[in-house]
Image (cartoon, rainbow, N blue to C red):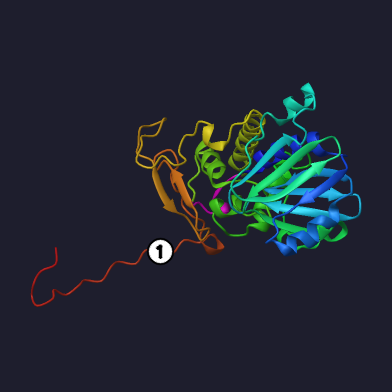
Amino acid sequence: MEGPEVDALSFRLSALAGRQWVDRIDVPTHRWQANVLLKHCSGKRINQIYSQGRWLLWNFSHGVSWAIYPLRRWRWSAQWTDADKPVVPDWLDNISPLSKDIGRRPLLRIMLENGGCLTLSGRPLLLVLPTEKLYRHPSLTGLGPKLSDEFLTDEIWEKRVRVLAGDKTISQAIMDESVVAGISNQTKCEMLFAGGIHPAARIGSIDSRRMREILVTARRRGDVLCRASLEGRGARDLPGNVYDRAGEPCGRCGTNILAERCGRDGLWSWYCPNCQRLPRQPMLFGVEPVAAPLPDIEPVNRVPLK
């Protein structure tokens, strides 16, 4: 799940449950630790629901926050607890992108004062922390800004990439959560294709103009994905140029798209070898070594080498 998708989810959940009082929180009995921590939020008001990268954050009125991360697939469903209660049109408009079917592994169920019921199912990572210490947690303390943050200008983006990412490849820099949070591997591949940049290119070989062009592409794609998520669609429903299209012809030049691991990020990168050529990498101190002539190789067992 990408950052813009979590943005859209936080907007919908905030419209449903923001500033609402929690009547009851139900947790499966075998999750004894979750029962102890989560049920302390019963009877409290939900002050705010927002996102940071892929993290979905809930702030409650008694100084406790939830930090939920889609480590694995999750599902949010919205229902009325009272089937005979007349349905408010605004409520239906708000829950349309959320699933009305509860998943197979319910993790928690939140009963709201207005009769609404939110159910989280799946196996996400869920942290319960004091609000004042929320961003001191190791998983949250190093998160960078989101693509939708207004203060993320072109200059700040380029500075963060060059300073925080160091001498990494551009593929590793984009996926570094400390640079910008919430960019997925799919968005990374489409960003680099739009800018004509090879995934294994070093940051020092990319000029400022192309560095800013890929930010524009990322923001444009993030806006489209956020609107699609509000309509109930996901990243897989958006058209792509290279992602997950290995062996297919490129839409620009017809060259077969390749997929390989670039750097140490452990993620596959899809790219067009013709549209995204690997530039000459900068050498140490800007000096390129002089190529020495190769020595003659003696034949083995008097068999000439071809």
* Quadrant in which residue 28 is drawn: bottom right
Residue 74 coordinates in the image, percent (x, y): 62, 47
Q: Amino acid at mark 1?
A: Val
Left or right, 96 with reference to 175:
right
Residue 116 coordinates in the image, percent (x, y): 79, 36
Q: Secondary structure at mark 1?
A: loop
| Picture residue at 8% right of the left edge, 72% below the top | 303
Quadrant where the N terminus lies? top right
Q: Nearer the viewer, residue 209 or 229?
A: 229
**Residue 138 visible to the viewer:** no
Q: Nearer the viewer, residue 103 or 198?
A: 103
- Pick out the residue farthest to the front: 84
The secondary structure making up most of the magenta span is: loop
- Pick out the residue farthest to the left: 302
Asked if the magenta segment contains residue 300, the reply would be: no
- Pick out the residue farthest to the bottom: 301
Left or right, 299 with reference to 150:
left
Residues in magenta, as a range: 200-207
